[in-house]
């Protein structure tokens, strides 16, 4: 599931194809037509389905459509790889212990939107990223993997984001592998 540039989606595809992750990315869903993730899917030959949230009456209706897509594709585990929508209990219940999110902070610090801006404003010297199982409350749930990065004196949002992104691409495949092993999927 992706809403934006899709670099985490591509990292997952690369990890599967490179043999570091015993999985197959069988489908991408996006909610923003023409987003970077959609373009990456076309380049990588991964089937992509658009579920534009603007076309659904409620969050629940969107999630029900997502579940139907996943079931049709035989999906066993779902990754929110930059999914900028709040999900409902319906999606969480459809994929218990197998719905993973990636967030650009060391949770439980700096939950919600603009986590990188929040870290800079707080003046922390260390930040990072967290891959975790999804619970109803945004950016909570069992932590699977974290990576820390230094926050440098001269950092801008862009420079800190780039440092964090590099670590997201490393830990997200690890988190998927870990979640799958916990469930005996591999
Ligand atoms: C990442 O920073 C992730 O932590 C957040 O959204 C961003 C997605 O980036 N949830 P990308 O679309 O994977 O490049």
Image (tube, grey):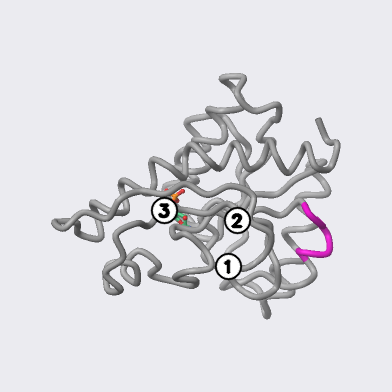
C-alpha distance separating marks 1 and 3 = 14 Å
Q: Quadrant of residue 124?
A: bottom left
Q: Is residue 74 above or below residue 16?
A: below
Range covered by the magenta-colored residues: 91-97
Q: Is residue 124 above or below residue 1?
A: below
Q: Residue furthest bottom?
A: 57
Label 1–label 3 contact, CB within 8 A: no
Which numbered disc flags the more N-terminal residue, 2 or 3? 2
Q: Residue furthest front?
A: 125
Q: Nearer the viewer, mark 2 or mark 3?
A: 3
Side of 53 where 136 appears, left or right: right
* Disc 1 target residue: 139
* Disc 2 target residue: 101
Q: Residue furthest top?
A: 19
Secondary structure of the residue carrying tag 1 is: loop
Q: Is residue 144 magenta?
A: no
Q: Is residue 152 above or below residue 172?
A: below
Residue count near mark 1 (Cα–Cα under 10 Å), binned few <14, some 14–19, many ≥20: many
C-alpha distance separating marks 1 and 2 = 8 Å
Secondary structure of the residue carrying tag 3 is: strand
Which numbered disc flags the more N-terminal residue, 1 or 2? 2
């Amino acid at each position: 599931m992706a809403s934006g540039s899709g670099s985490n989606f591509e990292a997952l595809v690369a990890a599967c194809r490179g043999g570091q992750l015993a999985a197959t990315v069988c489908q991408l869903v996006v909610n923003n037509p023409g987003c970077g993730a959609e373009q990456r899917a076309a380049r990588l030959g991964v089937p992509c389905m658009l579920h534009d949230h603007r076309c659904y009456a409620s969050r629940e209706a969107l999630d029900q459509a997502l579940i139907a897509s996943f079931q049709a594709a035989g999906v066993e585990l779902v990754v929110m790889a930059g999914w900028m929508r709040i999900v409902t209990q319906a999606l969480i219940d459809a994929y218990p212990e197998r719905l993973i999110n990636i967030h650009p902070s060391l949770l439980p610090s700096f939950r919600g939107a603009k986590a990188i801006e929040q870290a800079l404003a707080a003046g922390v010297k260390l930040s990072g990223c967290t891959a975790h199982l999804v619970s109803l409350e945004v950016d909570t749930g069992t932590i699977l993997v974290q990576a820390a990065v230094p926050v440098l004196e001269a950092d801008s949002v862009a420079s800190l984001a780039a440092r964090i992104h590099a670590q997201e691409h490393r830990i997200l495949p690890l988190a998927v592998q870990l979640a799958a092993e916990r469930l005996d999927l591999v």
